[in-house]
Every structure is written in structure tokens, then in C-alpha cells.
Image (spheres, rainbow, N blue to C red):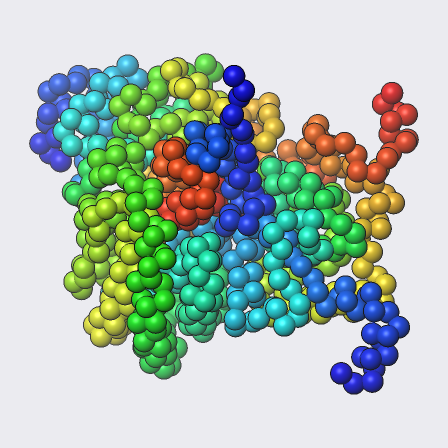
């Protein structure tokens, strides 16, 4: 992992890298560099895309896209992170590099509202109806929505 | 020129479908031209619900993602919480967790064998498999109190120790199941009809499987010897040695044979673990679990469940509830990417064959 | 058979034949499906009670709704229920159809299934044991004897309210109303 960190530092400027434990590499990059870093890592043997996820940082008004890669016969994984804006959430697709990224991007489009340019099939995957705010964002209050649509629910006491 | 194409729905209410999933097929005569999986019938918004409940309240929620084998889900969540909060687990708890997971693996493979044998028409073998799975669920009921959703793992160990005489009960049950393996072989696995129905159907090469993101026994049936229990060992797997069964061809026949070999290997592993188990405590106390705040950070942990690599990416914001949890379930790529590729060019009679041999469980896709 | 049974069979042969041969629609609706194969296979054999799975809804007269119902599943469930011939019965398995259960604050599951479909009996538990399912079937026999399992009659008589609830939660329905609703048409037209 240390060797990989040095090589990445040589080729790509403006990245923040961290090895918190053995066999784990965390890389934060700007969004313009994601596609070239993914191609570079695939060439080095990290050819299994495990997950494309998204974290909604509501207070900072940004989405954080997370890509996790592993190389199968070896231990450890690499987590790539980048930030995109929350108001017009748009990004490029990574299907030309990893073929199994298609359902992950479709799910993020439906549940968070992120638009992936170049995706062949951005149709609804899980949800039955349209929602005004995409359901997994932090400003969608699911308990209030349930009360409006399905009727009143019995009160729950929260102890703080 | 008359149009000969037809659009069919292999929908949720169908005699060949196990679970609540639907496939839209475009068919010409008997050959399938295009298949599209249509998930979402079991979507509950799990990851959103987890953000409203505290760390301990999420344990009963997390089991219910995978209905057939809820134990690997509990394991991966407990491992993520321990990694974020930096808690150690005592030695005896590691061994108990490994035995628990291996028993769940045998039960889950028997359920898959019920579904597959029922679909092919071998009803006798299906009844035997379900009966043996019930014997294993009796063991779970004595240990934890419930047959299906046992909430037994706790961050820092397991909830309670083995009761008196439990070790002998495990050994007796596994001997009675293992003694029936020659019957299973002569009735189903070495049967000429199974060979004719399954050989050469749904073939996948090793490069295609790796490119499309296959994991678990779909990958091992194509010839790649990869198992997370050997690559990145967790719990007590580094203390015993076990074999990883592999087959060459990549078709339905090889996948079912890999399942059979894995079951037999799990039974041998449980005997080895029972011999080596040390005495001691079974959990480390957690300070006030109902008002527990975990420091800021993120973690990705993975476990080898009976279907493949199961992973969890969890982010904590320093509060008493998870900020974001995202499960990477093995049925996601198998059901949405590989199934569509394998069904192209197959005949309608083989849809159930291919789908059940890929071991797709519908609630894992939708969460 | 002893004398009581012979008397019952002679008085009402239709009802006795209907009770002792329930055919269940094969539809795996939710997570309760994990406890239905143990009921059907050899350990808790349900065939001695006359229960076997039927392939299509046109050949069935019992519908087991196993577990929670999401919005997307509600459409095939209503279509399957409307295709079954009368007299038909439904049983809700698990705590989720009763009041939402564990997913009471989810945006995609139904909280009270009774508003959208008539249910004859509930089985509590998560998951209920296979013996509980068999006890529920024998309970349903007692209800049929007393004439209290009339879910399908309620559906026919109060179809206006069931259809209005279904349309409120699902939006537009693609199939026409099963029974004619004269008042609704007058309001819309």
C-alpha cells in the first residue's frame, strides 16, 4: 500500500491520501480526476469495483461520492472520495471502465437525484411513484410523509 | 413480414419463482432475445430507516435484509461497529461466532437445494433437504430462542454462552445429516437426469465473471480459487485449515456441485472448531449501550456469506445513530447484471434453472 | 368418522368439502415465506389438512399474505385477489400487515392492510412458527362453521370504499372496477 501511495502522489497532484490502518487507503480527489485515477488503478490490478455510494452532507451542502475498489487475491481495499454540489448534482458515468457500475448509478439517480451523463438506462429501479424530494436525502422526513399518506401513526417517545 | 416477437412477464406470482422478483422477457418462439430484471417489490428504504434508530436498536433491523441467512448480516454490522468504536472481542467469542456462521451456511445451502430440486422436479430430495434444515433450526432455537431471526451477536462478543450439553447436540445432529450424504448423491447429484438438465446451461467464463463483478460460488465455479475467509480472515478462521472447493466449467452443474462440496467442508470445519475452542468470557462490556456515541469515522468491512462477498460501508458523525450505512449484497450484481447476460439466448424452459442456480435472493437486491 | 361428523357432512356437504380442501395461491409476498416451506414439507405436513399449493389464482381459494406489503407489491396482490373465484379467504401472516410492524415509518410499505383488501384472520409474530400457521387454519374452519368468515361478501358490498383507498395510495389503477360503482361514476362524470 505504501508503494501505491507514492506512485499515486507522483502521477496525480492535488490529492489527499491517508493510510489509517494496514491494507486500507483513503484518497480524496477533485471530481475532474476521478476517471483517470480509476483507469490508473485498474491497470495496477485493482479491477473489482465493489460499491458506488453517496453520503449526503446536509450542512455543507455537498454530496460525497464514494468508490471502493479491491484486488481479489490480496488483502485490503481503496476508498476514493470526491465531492459534488447538492443543487445541480451531476457526474459522468464510469461504465466504460467497470461494466458492473450500471445498477449502482441507476440506484443513486433514483434515490438521491444525481444525474449521470452517458448512462444508457436511467429508468426507475425500486420506487413505484414520484417523490418531490428524492427519498434518501436528509431533508426528506419519512415520518411526516407516512402520516400524510397512510394516516396517523401512534406517538413514540424519544428519550434524549 | 409478420412480427414474431412477444413480450412476456415472468412475474411475481409464478410457480417457478422463489421470492418476489419479476423478469420481463422478449421472446421469439422459444428463444429469449432480451431479459430485464424488475426488482423493487420488497423495497423498504432500509438504509434510511437505519438513520433513525440508535446503534443497538439497529440489530433487529439488520437481520431482516436477507431472509434465508440472517446471521451473516448481523456479523457484518457487529464487525463494522466494533471497527468504528475500537472494541476488542474475546477469544472464545470468535470461536462461537465461527461455529454460528458455519451452521447458518449449511442451513442456507439446504434451503437453496430445496428450491433447486423442487424446480427440477426432484421432490423427494427437496423434502429431505427441508427436514435437515429444520434440524439445524432446532439447534438455533435452543441457543438463541428463535428459529429464524436470532439476534445473538452483540458488539463485543455474543449474548450468552453455550448451554449445557450443547456441544454433544451439535455433533449428533451433524452426524445424522452427514450420514445421509450417500443417499443425496445417489438420488440427486449423481443422477443422469440432473446431468442432462444442467450441463452446459448458463455458461460463464472466468474473465467474463471477473469483469462483471461476480463473487462467491459463481466465481468459484469458473475456476478462480477466491474466498474471503482465506484472503482476509476474520473471527477464528485463521486458526484452522480448510479447503476451498473449485470447479472448472462455470455452468449450472458446476455451481450446484460447488454448493454440495461447501456444505461438506463446513461440517468438517465445525468439528475442528469444536475441538479447539478455549474457555473464557464471551463478551466485553459496552458502556451504557442505550446512550452510546461512537467517534467520527468510516469503515468498510466484508464477510463471506453463503452467496458471496457481503460488505458494509458505514459512516459515523459522532452521534448516537449511524449517519449512513450502505450494504453491498452479493445478489445485487448477480441478479441485475449477470442474470440479464446469461438469459440472452437461453430457452424459456431454462429461466428457473439459471435463476435459482445463481442463488439470487430478492430482499437482498431491494433492501 | 363418528356420528357427529356424519351428521355435519349430511347436513351441509358443500361447506365441509370447502373447509377441508383449501388450495393456497403460490405467491411469495414477503419475508414470511421462510416459514411456509416447513409447513408444506414432511415435518409439519399440511397436506393432511387438505392444503396444497395451486399454480394460478383461478384454481385457489386461500391467499396467505406472508409479511409486509410494499406499494409495488400491492398491485399484483389486488389483481390476484380479484381473480380468485368466490368463496375465498385471506390470512395475514406476521405483525407487519396488522399495523406496520417494524417498518412503521417507512415510506414504501402499507400500514393497515385491512383498508385495501378484506382479511379474515391475522397471525401475530415475527416469524410465526409453523404450528401457529396450522392453528390459524383450524381457527378458520371454526369461523366458516359459524358463518363469520365473510371477507369476500364485505368486498362486494363495500367495494366503493376499498377502491377509493386503493386509488388514493397507488395513483391510477390500470384495471377497471370489479363491481359496478354507480355513485363514483356520477361524481367523476
Q: Residue at x 24, y 66 (%)?
A: B269
Q: State whether residue B49 is above or below residue C186.
A: below
Q: Position of residue C38 (x, y in %)?
A: 52, 65
Q: Farthest bottom residue?
A: C2
Q: Residue at x 38, y 33 (%)?
A: B345
Q: Residue at x 62, y 45 (%)?
A: C69
For the image shown, how many numbered marks are present on the structure?
A: 0
Q: State whether residue C149 is above or below residue C57.
A: below
Q: Farthest front residue?
A: B1
A45 vs C107, nearest the viewer: A45
Q: Is residue B310 visible?
A: no
Q: Position of residue A73 (x, y in %)?
A: 16, 43
Q: State whether residue C40 is above or below residue C165.
A: below
The image quarter containing residue C91 is bottom right
Q: Position of residue C101 (x, y in %)?
A: 62, 51
Q: Position of residue B75 (x, y in %)?
A: 36, 54
C49 vs B273, nearest the viewer: C49
Q: Residue at x 90, y 25 (%)?
A: C186
Amino acid at each position: 500500500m505504501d508503494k501505491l501511495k507514492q506512485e499515486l502522489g507522483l502521477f496525480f497532484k492535488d490529492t489527499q491520501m491517508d493510510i489509517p490502518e494496514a491494507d486500507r487507503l483513503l484518497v480524496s480527489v477533485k471530481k475532474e480526476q476521478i476517471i483517470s485515477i480509476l483507469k490508473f488503478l485498474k491497470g495496477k490490478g485493482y479491477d473489482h469495483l465493489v460499491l458506488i455510494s453517496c453520503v449526503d452532507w446536509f450542512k455543507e451542502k455537498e454530496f460525497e461520492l464514494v468508490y471502493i475498489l479491491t484486488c481479489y487475491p490480496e488483502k485490503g481495499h481503496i476508498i476514493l472520495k470526491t465531492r459534488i454540489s447538492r443543487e445541480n448534482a451531476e457526474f459522468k458515468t464510469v461504465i466504460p471502465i467497470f461494466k458492473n457500475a450500471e445498477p449502482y448509478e441507476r440506484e443513486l439517480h433514483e434515490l438521491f437525484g444525481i444525474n449521470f451523463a452517458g448512462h444508457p438506462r436511467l429508468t426507475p429501479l425500486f420506487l413505484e411513484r414520484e417523490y418531490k424530494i428524492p427519498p434518501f436525502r436528509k431533508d426528506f422526513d419519512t415520518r411526516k410523509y407516512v402520516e400524510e399518506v397512510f394516516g396517523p401513526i401512534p406517538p413514540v417517545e424519544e428519550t434524549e | 413480414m409478420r412480427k414474431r416477437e412477444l413480450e412476456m412477464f415472468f412475474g411475481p406470482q409464478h410457480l417457478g419463482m422463489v421470492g418476489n422478483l419479476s423478469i420481463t422477457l422478449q421472446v421469439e418462439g422459444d428463444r429469449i432475445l432480451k431479459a430485464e430484471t424488475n426488482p423493487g417489490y420488497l423495497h423498504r428504504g432500509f438504509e434510511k430507516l437505519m438513520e433513525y434508530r440508535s446503534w443497538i436498536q439497529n440489530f433487529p433491523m439488520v437481520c431482516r435484509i436477507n431472509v434465508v441467512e440472517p446471521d451473516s448480516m448481523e456479523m457484518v454490522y457487529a464487525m463494522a461497529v466494533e471497527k468504528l468504536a475500537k472494541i476488542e472481542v474475546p477469544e472464545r467469542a470468535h470461536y462461537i461466532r465461527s461455529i454460528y456462521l458455519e451452521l447458518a451456511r449449511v442451513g442456507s445451502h439446504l434451503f437453496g437445494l430445496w428450491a433447486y430440486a423442487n424446480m427440477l422436479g426432484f421432490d423427494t430430495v427437496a423434502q429431505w433437504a427441508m427436514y435437515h434444515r429444520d434440524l439445524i433450526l432446532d439447534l438455533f432455537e435452543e441457543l438463541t430462542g428463535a428459529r429464524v431471526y436470532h439476534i445473538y451477536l452483540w458488539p463485543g462478543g455474543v449474548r450468552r454462552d453455550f448451554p449445557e450439553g450443547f456441544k454433544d447436540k451439535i455433533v449428533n445432529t451433524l452426524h445424522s445429516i452427514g450420514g445421509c450424504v450417500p443417499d443425496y448423491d445417489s438420488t440427486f447429484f449423481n443422477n443422469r437426469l440432473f446431468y442432462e438438465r444442467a450441463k452446459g446451461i448458463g455458461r460463464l467464463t472466468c474473465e467474463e465473471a471477473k469483469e462483471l463483478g461476480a463473487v462467491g460460488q459463481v466465481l468459484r465455479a469458473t475456476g478462480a480459487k477466491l474466498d474471503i475467509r482465506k484472503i482476509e480472515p476474520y473471527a477464528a478462521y485463521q486458526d484452522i485449515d480448510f479447503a476451498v472447493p473449485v470447479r472448472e466449467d462455470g455452468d449450472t452443474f458446476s455451481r450446484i456441485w460447488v454448493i454440495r462440496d461447501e456444505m461438506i467442508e463446513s461440517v468438517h470445519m465445525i468439528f475442528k472448531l469444536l475441538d479447539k475452542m478455549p474457555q473464557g468470557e464471551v463478551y466485553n462490556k459496552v458502556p451504557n449501550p442505550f446512550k452510546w456515541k461512537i467517534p467520527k469515522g468510516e469503515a468498510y468491512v466484508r464477510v463471506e456469506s453463503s452467496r458471496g462477498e457481503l460488505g458494509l460501508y458505514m459512516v459515523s458523525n459522532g452521534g448516537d445513530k449511524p449517519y449512513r450505512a450502505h450494504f453491498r449484497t452479493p445478489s445485487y450484481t448477480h441478479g441485475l447484471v449477470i442474470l440479464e447476460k446469461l438469459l440472452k439466448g437461453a430457452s424459456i424452459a431454462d429461466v428457473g434453472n439459471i435463476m435459482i442456480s445463481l442463488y439470487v435472493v430478492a430482499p437482498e437486491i431491494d433492501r | 368418522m363418528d356420528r357427529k361428523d356424519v351428521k355435519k357432512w349430511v347436513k351441509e356437504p358443500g361447506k365441509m368439502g370447502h373447509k377441508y380442501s383449501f388450495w393456497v395461491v403460490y405467491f411469495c409476498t414477503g419475508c414470511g415465506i421462510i416459514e411456509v416451506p416447513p409447513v408444506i414439507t414432511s415435518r409439519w405436513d399440511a397436506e393432511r389438512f387438505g392444503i396444497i399449493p395451486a399454480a394460478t389464482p383461478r384454481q385457489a381459494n386461500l391467499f396467505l399474505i406472508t409479511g409486509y406489503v410494499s406499494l409495488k407489491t400491492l398491485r399484483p396482490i389486488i389483481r390476484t385477489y380479484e381473480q380468485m373465484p368466490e368463496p375465498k379467504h385471506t390470512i395475514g401472516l406476521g405483525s407487519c400487515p396488522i399495523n406496520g410492524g417494524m417498518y412503521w415509518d417507512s415510506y414504501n410499505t402499507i400500514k393497515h392492510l385491512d383498508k385495501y383488501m378484506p382479511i379474515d384472520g391475522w397471525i401475530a409474530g415475527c416469524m410465526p412458527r409453523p404450528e401457529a400457521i396450522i392453528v390459524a387454519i383450524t381457527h378458520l374452519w371454526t369461523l366458516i362453521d359459524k358463518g363469520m368468515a365473510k371477507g369476500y361478501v364485505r368486498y362486494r358490498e363495500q367495494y366503493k370504499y376499498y377502491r377509493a383507498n386503493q386509488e388514493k395510495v397507488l395513483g391510477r389503477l390500470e384495471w377497471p372496477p370489479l363491481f359496478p360503482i354507480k355513485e363514483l361514476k356520477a361524481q367523476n362524470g
